[in-house]
Image (tube, rainbow, N blue to C red):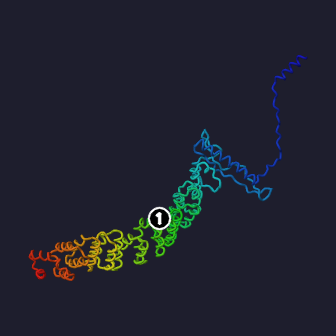
Amino acid sequence: MAKTRSGAGNANRNQKPQPQVVEQVPIIGATPEPITMARVRTMIQTMLAEQREELRQMLLNDRDEPSVLVEQRELNDDRSEEGNNSRSISHSEPLMVGRNNQEGRVERNGCKYKDFMTCKPLTFNGKEDLVGTVDNDLALKIYIKARATPKVVAAFAERREFDKILIYSKQVGYSPDYLFLLQTILRSDPRGAVNFALMMSQMEGGCPVDYNTITDLFLQRNLIREATAFLLDVLKPNLPEHAHLQTKVLEINLVTFPNVADAILANGMFSHYDRPRIAQLCEKAGLYVRALQHYSELPDIKRVILLVNLRGNLQIIVQVAKEYCEQLGVESCIKIFEQFKSYEGLYFFLGSYLSSSEDPDIHFKYIEAAAKVGQIKEVERVTRESNFYDAEKTKNFLMEAKLPDARPLINVCDRFGFVPDLTHYLYTNNMLRYIEGYVQKVNPGNAPLVVGQLLDDECPEDFIKGLILSVRSLLPVEPLVDECEKRNRLRLLTQFLEHLVSEGSQDVHVHNDYISFY
């Protein structure tokens, strides 16, 4: 018996213990707990999160054509016992995107994307777009098929396909909020916002957003370059009604980028802006030449000239003086140049008026300016050709100037009867060759006056005799004799008269004067 018990005990020990079976007793009469709106929200959020992650993994791991469940579930509007704010929802699967399994069957009772696109469009106005989070191209196709126009426009904007926004909106007859779109684009893509604004400006019927409003949007974000690019393009027609915007684009650049404003003004593309305002800003920005081009009041012009490098900008200053000459007057312009001793500027300025003016002062000022800047040939030409300068005033100036070339003074004195003064000046300044040149080439008929002045200046007789003999028969004998007789110097002419007689002169005065010596 002991053995048997022991064997039985061993047998029991070798057997594995059997798991205990617990019998499930059904609960009779249990009522499902009502689903409140709070639970619905939680369920939906959980399902959306799961589906978003599932869709992301599916598209990343397998790009096969997805399928979309298009079955719509019904939300029961029955009120529960908990109150007016509770609702119940039938147990169903939410709208989701699935994919084909390896056997070609569609998982979770979905339909293929192609089948979905042939279905009747659904209302598609949810705030969370599952497809858009992982595949923008697919999302855009769904938006278009569902006729979710605002989402289509937003998708095009996100893709920076701004031209398609305008084309699509026109095709479907939709008027988007262009100002909101521009603001949205501006936050992430300022250059794209410029392009979109320019596209709007070219729309049929005019730009849907005011140019000034668009400009302010850029300036509020300190996007000066973008605002300038937009305005320079839309203001190309140079219309009077855009005067304010022309002024604005110049103002903002004169304050921030003066070199850009200078280039705009140099291009001359605007003509209706506020010139006095821009003149002031040019002066503040150090663009003094541009300021001169815009100022019209004499005090302003004088003030700016003090700040300008006259030599470096002389031609521009002269051009400004010419442009406003009628308003300021020639005399005022002359005074400005004289005040700053800019004779070169005065020379160029008066040169444009000389041929059409008979004003003696303008002609004299031109001669004076030309002499002071070394334009001797021009001085010689004007003193020879002009009939309007003051001869006495010009003669005195040329004598004081002591030019290295005496021809301008010779022109004045010969034309207006200042030969004795000329002779005295040339002799006292040791310019004897000019005396010879004047008597021999310019006007031999005035040789008696030259000889008389030389005698008064106690010039050596040898020089005077040589000067007389160099002229010979061209010299008028009687006036010469008179000049010498006045000074009791007739003996000076003996050799001269002998030469004329020996050469067979038939002049009665030659023979009479020659005989009188004997």
Q: Quadrant of the C terminus?
A: bottom left
* Whether residue 217 is situated above or below residue 29 in the rendered picture: below
The answer to whether residue 363 is seen in the rendering is no
* Whether residue 369 is situated above or below residue 99 in the rendered picture: below
Amino acid type at circle 1 is: Asp
Return the x and y of residue 397 as percentages of the image width and height: 34, 76
Report helix, strand or loop for mark 1.
helix
Toward the viewer: 35 or 424?
A: 424
Going 83% across and 47% down the picture, which residue do you hit?
A: 29
Q: Left or right: 509 with respect to 220? A: left
Q: Left or right: 247 with respect to 493? A: right
Q: Quadrant of the N terminus?
A: top right
Q: Left or right: 263 with respect to 378? A: right
* Whether residue 494 is situated above or below residue 286 in the rendered picture: below
Residue at mark 1:
262
Q: Left or right: 458 with respect to 257? A: left
Return the x and y of residue 212 as percentages of the image width and height: 55, 67
Q: Quadrant of residue 14?
A: top right
Return the x and y of residue 188 as percentages of the image width and height: 58, 56
Going 41% across and 66% down the picture, which residue do you hit?
A: 311
Toward the viewer: 100 or 78?
A: 100
Toward the viewer: 104 or 245?
A: 245
The answer to whether residue 3 is seen in the rendering is yes
Return the x and y of residue 12 as percentages of the image width and height: 84, 23
